[in-house]
Amino acid sequence: MTRLRNQPAWAALLIVIGLLSPSAAQKELLYDFETPEQHRENTPGTSVPPGWGSFGTITTDRGPTTDASAGETARFHSGDFDLPSDLPGNYGLVDVSDRFVPYRKDFSNYVGLSLDLKFKVFEALPYEGPIAIEVGIGFIVPGVGEDESLAVYSEPITLTESYDTYDVFFSDYTFVQSGAALENDLANNAFIKLRFSNTMENYGRGAFYYDEIYGILGSGPAGDADFDSDGDVDGNDFLVWQQGFGLASQTNKSAGDSNGDGVVDGADLGVWSGQFGSVGSTALGVPEPGALLLSGVALIAAAGRRKTQRR
């Protein structure tokens, strides 16, 4: 998972000199929730299938909201977590995207998803407990329907009370199904599942909000630019790379070698630029460094002191 919003102000300077790409991965919009069709309800007596759905016995409200990260409309799902988690069916809150043809999306061209997410605590009955959501992939088996035993989920994503953008990659899922879903190639019988679990540690009332869902194009995550191993990728990691730039032979991540090729060079800076602002163990995949990026490397190399090879 990669968190991309709320970058420090000094990141703007790096963007100007070409050291940081503000959007390293290409993305295609899947859902922005700005049209009524994306909020279809299951109307009795009609043949129109429902759109996004919300499930869970603790549900108190769900559907469209004007509290959006972009545009005018998003979606939310609230619940009362005071209800015991061991009640039948009280698994928490789950939202799913279009599951039926012709509205279901084809994910086969994407390597992951990018979503705007946040959590809200209600003052009247404040929520206590883990604020973590899982981004899942469910499957429709032709002629049968949804097979819940095939669903897979990301590692839990800790939300804040402000919208942040989170990237998840299909390469991090362990798919149960064979044939219809490959590690980086989802068939068009898949759909999105957002799961906020109810446990013995949840109390009070809370809600998760989601908006601006994109499919990520290109390659999956490559390398690890958390050079100081503190759980995020930030300016301190850039300084590690800068100090190690030019080193070769017996280098490792702590010296700025993000891709493990034994050299600290522009390719490692490219990984850092794509992962900048991320929190967690999974980093954002990036393309090869562009002309501006290589120019930045040349400037740093000229200004910095020359490094010798480690023996």
Image (spheres, grey):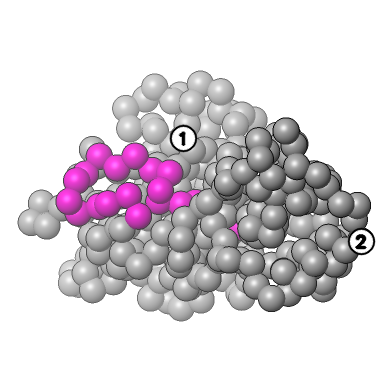
Q: Position of residue 239 (x, y in %)?
A: 83, 48
Residue 197 disc label: 1
- Side of 39 where 203 appears, left or right: right
Q: How many labels sit on residues? A: 2
- Residue at x-position 39% and y-position 33%: 91
**Which residue corresponds to the image point at 7% horizontal and 56% vertical from the top-left?**
143
The residue that appears at 64% across and 30% down in the rendered structure is: 128
Q: Residues within 10 Å of mark 2 (few under 14, many from 20)?
A: few
Instruction: State the CA–CA distance, disc 2 to disc 1.
Output: 52 Å
Looking at the rendered structure, the kind of residue marked 2 is Ala
The quadrant of the image that shows the C terminus is: top right
Taking depth in this image into account, of 230 and 60 the one nearest to the observer is 230
The front one of 276 and 44 is 276
* Crowding at mark 1 (Cα within 10 Å: few <14, some 14-19, many 20+): many
Give me the disc on residue 28: none
Q: Is residue 36 above or below residue 90?
A: below
Residue 24 lies in quadrant: bottom right
Q: Is residue 68 left or right of residue 236?
A: left
Give the amino acid at mark 1: Ser
User: Farthest residue in the bottom direction?
Assistant: 35
* Residue extent of the magenta highlight: 165-184
Can see residue 130?
Answer: yes
Which tag, 2 or 1, sits closer to the chain's start?
1
Q: Which residue is mark 2?
A: 303
- Frontmost residue, 289 versus 77: 289
Residue 63 visible from this viewpoint: no
Position of 230 relative to 246 (above/below) = above
